[in-house]
Amino acid sequence: MHLPQLFAYLLPLCLSAAATHLSAPSGPYNVGFTQHIFNHTTPNDPTPGPGNIFLTSIYYPTRSVPSPNTSVAYFDATSAAIWGDVFNILPSHLLSLETTLQWQAPLLSDKEDVEKIKNWPTLVFGPGGGMNAGYFTSLLSDLASQGYTVLALDHPGEAPYLPLPYGNPGVVGWDIYMPYTDSLIVEMYEYRRAEMVALLGPDGFPALVELYGAYFNTQQYGAFGHSIGAATATGAMDGLDSIVAGFNIDGGLFGDSVNASLKGRPYFMTMNPNHFASDPDTWISFAERYANESKTEGGWLDWTTVEGSAHLAFSDISLWVELLPKIENATEKVDLGNVSGTRMDEILKTYVVSFFEWVTCGRYDEKLLDGEVEAWPEVVFNAKVRSDGHGTDGQNLGEGHA
Ligand SMILES: *[C@@H]1O[C@H](CO)[C@@H](O)[C@H](O)[C@H]1NC(C)=O
Ligand SMILES: *[C@@H]1O[C@H](CO)[C@@H](O)[C@H](O)[C@H]1NC(C)=O
Ligand SMILES: *[C@@H]1O[C@H](CO)[C@@H](O)[C@H](O)[C@H]1NC(C)=O
Ligand SMILES: *[C@@H]1O[C@H](CO)[C@@H](O)[C@H](O)[C@H]1NC(C)=O
Ligand SMILES: *[C@@H]1O[C@H](CO)[C@@H](O)[C@H](O)[C@H]1NC(C)=O
Ligand SMILES: *[C@@H]1O[C@H](CO)[C@@H](O)[C@H](O)[C@H]1NC(C)=O
């Protein structure tokens, strides 16, 4: 057989089977996935959602090997049409994205596995405004593959469309171009914080874990989020001492999160270079107050910028745009910066994983957490707070950003 013929024969087959994968999670475990709908009332819910539920997606380590039968779809058809239009991607291409998540795969059962990770903090995540938590699948799966249990929250009605599990109809929410006023953002922050606090309260995740007899940690949490999801995580830290650390992905501090008292708990914040255009002052005053508190409470804070990045690039969106074909000649509607999707993905995973690894296991990567890394010159430090003289004392906070 002539080689060219072989290729001519194979090519159409390959194309028709095309599926696009996000990069495989980097940790030693595969990733299980389940969802739970919690009853929870939002008084005067401003969204078109029902106002009496929130959705929690649970990502967790498993030894089960991914198979096409159990793998969870990335997109639903309704969302693919809405998001494809914004980012100039055909819905069919978004629908070709595949995850390595396995629906309700068995939990770890090996004694050694369980002993190793059962006391790691459970991580709780809030997505950016109007986004489904699933659009952070790459980061959330990666954390689960390291051994963490990760809980991600969705408030039905906020994103344009949220599919619900177990045969429940999906929820149509706000238009994707919904303009958020300042007062609306505070309302969103408030229902999101109430949901995160309810999830970690006795009737939330701990009750579910007890019901299923799982080994998940319900005593200690790490909180993180993107945009308003980061404000939510920060506000939740103020009320809940069970949250031991926080990671803020480019999120202005809305509502009362601006005054959150972290009592020296480790906190990482990373932003895009234009962050101050939309949020001129909350980070500066927050970090200054944190540094002040740290004099008596201990404390650890990093504040970085990813040069060349943009707000929505701190999500899977920049991966969709990089990995999938673009509709030809369509006008770009959203700036995703000039750092490629796979690079943003790698940067974000590395810092989040390294931060929580330190908090969890005490493994402190000085290169990553204390300084600039040669491989990523675009990650620059604006401030560090250290209580033990390690690093700077944060006295130059905000310099050059006023
Ligand atoms: C939530 O409320 C619905 C209807 O009000 C009820 O059928 C369901 O059992 C409740 N779920 C839980 C977990 O309590
Ligand atoms: C996948 O599903 C098909 C059809 O239901 C079944 O025949 C097959 O055994 C399943 N494969 C695995 C690996 O579970
Ligand atoms: C934050 O604290 C300041 C100073 O105490 C206060 O003026 C402000 O109203 C507080 N903001 C919120 C949203 O609670
Ligand atoms: C930090 O502490 C100093 C001295 O106690 C005080 O003057 C300053 O207002 C404090 N700054 C903040 C942001 O709390
Ligand atoms: C990317 O953007 C950053 C900051 O906006 C700029 O410094 C850098 O030169 C840009 N890089 C490229 C390759 O355009
Ligand atoms: C896109 O633009 C190029 C150059 O202007 C043109 O040759 C091409 O036909 C256009 N493609 C479509 C699908 O409009």
Image (spheres, rainbow, N blue to C red):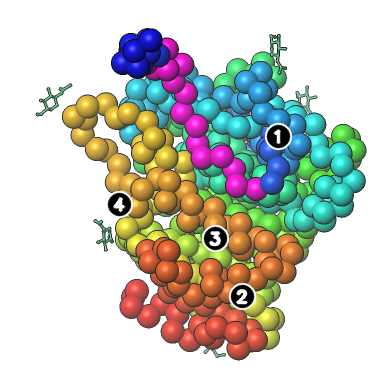
**Residue linked to disc 1:** 32
Q: Mark 2 points at which residue?
A: 300
Q: Can residue 146 be seen in this view?
A: yes
Give the mark nearer the N terminus: 2 vs 1: 1
Residues tagged 2 and 4 counted as in contact (Cβ below 8 A): no
Tell me if label 4 and label 1 are in contact, CB under 8 Å: no
* Direction from residue 23 to residue 88 in the image, left or right: left
How many neighbours does mark 1 have within 10 angstroms: few (below 14), some (14-19), or many (20 or more)? many
Label 4 residue near ligand 5, CB within 8 Å: yes
Q: In this view, does 150 lie above or below 360?
A: above
User: Dot 3, how many residues are within 10 Å of its Cα: few (below 14), some (14-19), or many (20+)?
Assistant: some
Earlier sequence position, callout 3 versus callout 1: 1
Mark on residue 351?
A: 3
Q: What stretch is highlighted in magenta?
A: 11-27
- CB within 8 Å, label 3 to label 1: no
Q: What residue type is labelled 1?
A: Gly
Residue 161 in view of the camera: no
Q: Which amino acid does label 3 sit on?
A: Tyr
Residue 393 relative to residue 144: left or right? left
Residue tagged by mark 4? Answer: 338
For the residues labelled 3 and 1, the Cα–Cα distance comes to 23 Å
